[in-house]
Amino acid sequence: MNIHEFQAKELLRQYKVATPDGRVATDAEDARQITKAYGGKSVVKAQIHAGGRGKGGGVKFATDPDKAAELFKQMLGMNLVTKQTGAEGRRVYTVFISDPVDIDRELYLSFLVDRVSSRITILASTEGGVEIEEVAAKTPEKIVRVAIDPAVGLSAFQAREVAFALKLEGDAFKKGVTFLQNLYRLFVEKDCSMVEVNPLVVTKTGDVIALDAKMGFDDNALFRHPDILAFRDLHEEAPEETEASKFNLNFIKLDGTIGCMVNGAGLAMGTMDIIKYHGGSPANFLDVGGSATEDAVMNAFRIILQDKAVKGVMVNIFGGIMRCDIVAGGIVKAAKQIGIKVPVVVRLEGTNGEEGKKILADSGLNLIVAEGLEDAAKKIVAATK
Ligand code: ADP
Ligand code: MG
């Protein structure tokens, strides 16, 4: 799960990681008052779960309180398109007003879980403010990596190594080391999967502070962090995914046109592969699980049918513990509730396969029956072309 900048900064403050003052404005008048409190100037920042806001028009400087109010009105409700949002962009529901900082240098810092070494790893670079992918492509020697031994934690030696690589000096060096140690503690205690501070800045007065912060958390650990879970923003998730999670369905929205209802993650991967192989493109990944009820199947099918991008559906069920007649029952129920307006190819095999096929045949629904995986993929691709 990801959170917004303003929420990440709350956590930073809890862990004594330096970050500028900032508050969410409730309305334009509030934006004006906050800016006044910051001495008449502020940075107005749109809150979405994507970076690149600066270039997309989601981070703007207010030179006086009236300007802040005006910027607030512009940003709230706008559809912000950045390099990371895709062409469709994201709507802005929250606007954050930040105390402006006199920047001397912009640096890059992130903590992530490196799957190869199985260690929390620090990435740091003197080239901040720009996208790290760009730095990695053009000047990879400017990125340092430090892997942290979980048994030892972030040692003072390693924190100094990073501070040195960031060319911090004197007081800023000491502040940088403290910054790193506190951020590491936050990362571990809150079960983060990723923290990116870009830019980390050295101010004109020698402070080392997080001007921006992106944080992601391990979903499997959220049960022990109610405070983090409270930060969840459903606006930032595909509505179908939110709906599916209510029924314990494993659903991920993709950008193709063929909806897939499958039991088992492995079979779902195989189904997506074979659709691609035959020239189609999956609209989602949906695993109803190994022992879904008729209601779960019905909800899964309904969620797929409601997706406007779906031009056809491929149902691929291999009945083991899952019974095909239950799947068929769920499909029929969903179809009767909302109707089927797109071609649906069904491949049912395994436990109670014959009963399942009979339920579908007797339902009077216009379904295309397939024999085997390949046949199903060919039929759905042909039907949606
Ligand atoms: P994004 O990464 O989404 O573009 P940032 O928060 O990194 O958004 O802001 C983009 C740029 O705006 C920063 O690199 C920095 O130069 C400037 N900026 C952001 N917040 C402040 C602030 N409080 N004071 C001064 N400059 C800021
Ligand atoms: Mg940034």
Image (cartoon, rainbow, N blue to C red):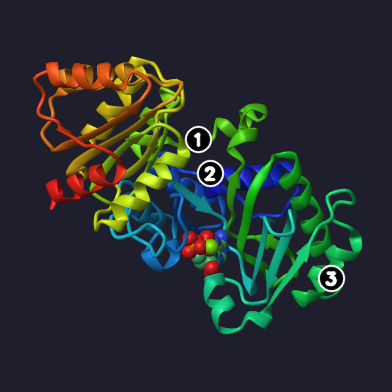
Q: Residues within 10 Å of mark 3 (few under 14, many from 20)?
A: some
Q: CA distance from mark 3 to mark 1?
A: 35 Å
Residue 161 is labelled as: 3
Residue 3 is labelled as: 2
> Helix, strand or loop at disc 1?
loop
Asked if residue 5 lies left or right of residue 175, the reply is left
Q: Mark 2 belongs to which amino acid? A: Ile
| Res 203 visible | no
Q: At 89% across and 58% down in the image, what residue appears? A: 155
Q: At 45% across and 25% down in the image, what residue appears? A: 248
Asked if residue 297 lies left or right of residue 141, the reply is left
Q: Nearer the viewer, residue 219 or 249?
A: 249
Q: Position of residue 41 (x, y in %)?
A: 50, 60
Q: CA distance from mark 2 to mark 1?
A: 7 Å
Q: Nearer the viewer, residue 356 or 246?
A: 356
Q: Position of residue 346 (x, y in %)?
A: 23, 33
Mark toward the start of the polypeptide (3 vs 1):
3
Mark toward the start of the polypeptide (2 vs 1):
2
